Amino acid sequence: MSETVKRLAIVGAGMIGASWAALASAHGIRVCAYDPNPEAEARFLSYVERARAQLAELGLTGSGAVGFSDDLAASLEGAGFVQENGPENEAVKRRLLAEIDGLLPSEVVIASSTSALVRSAIVADCAQPERIIVAHPFNPPHLVPLVEIVGANPLIVARAAAFYRALGRRPVILNREMPGHIANRLASALYREAVHLVEQGVASVADIDAALCNGPGLRWALMGPHMTYHLGGGEGGIAGYLAHLGPSQVRRWQSLGSPSLDTDVQAKIIAGVAEEAGGRSIAELEARRDEGLLALLKARTLVSE
């Protein structure tokens, strides 16, 4: 499919849309982005420029043209693939996807980025819902490879997965829709326990964060939880782990918390994050994150490949 997608339409030109635009452009694909916000264009083009510089560090130096329009139909004209990144609002997405669906030839795949909405709801008003998939990235998508795909037509899903692979992404395909898909559910489960540890006064926010990124987080950048425990089982692998250490895992599950997010807990988290940030702005922290992501992407070797 990468050979046939010469023009990508981006609907919603915020941070996610700009990140997708930079990635596609760096692979030589022409991009036209749409956003009705009169202030969106300048921010969009500025972000694309920064992201393109980061991608060049990874050897991606394609130069697909990047344009912008405040007219939806004009932005979609000639597109071989559409990446929609509108607001995380079911009613808005339903209207937007139905409008996009009505403006495009039937063979064009429409991908919607949503972190929590389910596909069956947001395609309900579309005339051709089978050609619309959920394609949820992790921020920033030009650096983080994951794309979670949910669709009803296996052929459309396969075409979309091939497109994302051609962009150097790692698509994962859900067999059925689930609120939060896969990665956000895993992240939410972890964050629930991180909040519980704050609530119970077990450790500081900074030390809870440090325990993750200096311990299991290092391994999780290379392998997922199932493979991690497979190696944790020694010569017996996952079967040995489950047989011998499964009961201890169950005991830990039973001790996990269900914290509240009342004003007191929120105040503790906010104060702890401020202390951990050490006066650095969001922009500075994002730059440090992206610098680290670039280094990881250059260095990592996936265990299961």
Image (cartoon, rainbow, N blue to C red):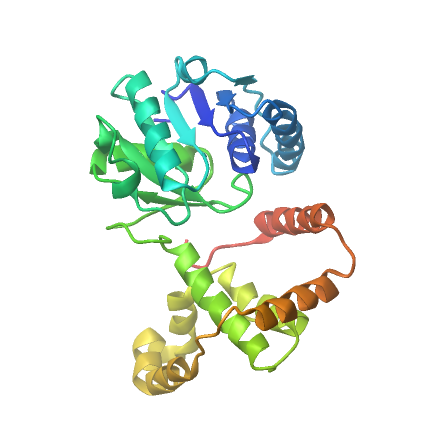
The image quadrant that residue 274 belongs to is bottom right
In the depicted structure, whether residue 52 falls above or below residue 257: above
Q: Quick check: 66 left or right of 158?
A: right
Q: How far across and down, in percent of the image, does residue 240 sit? A: 32, 81
Q: Residue at x 41, y 41 (%)?
A: 89
Taking depth in this image into account, of 252 and 57 the one nearest to the observer is 252
Q: How far across and down, in percent of the image, does residue 22 sit? A: 56, 30
Taking depth in this image into account, of 124 and 284 the one nearest to the observer is 124
In the depicted structure, whether residue 164 falls above or below residue 265: above
Pick the quarter of the image with the N terminus. top left
In the depicted structure, whether residue 145 falls above or below residue 182: above
Q: Residue at x 42, y 62 (%)?
A: 186
Residue sitting at the far front: 263
Q: Quick check: 267 left or right of 226?
A: right
Residue sitting at the far right: 279
Taking depth in this image into account, of 85 and 154 the one nearest to the observer is 85
Taking depth in this image into account, of 25 and 128 the one nearest to the observer is 128
Q: Residue at x 42, y 30 (%)?
A: 83
For the image shown, how many numbered marks are present on the structure? Answer: 0
Instruction: Tell me, yes or no, if residue 162 can be seen here.
Output: no
Instruction: Tell me, yes or no, if residue 272 can be seen here.
Output: yes
Q: How far across and down, in percent of the image, does residue 41 sit? A: 60, 23
Q: How far across and down, in percent of the image, does residue 45 sit? A: 63, 25
Q: Residue at x 57, y 24 (%)?
A: 62
The image quadrant that residue 249 belongs to is bottom left
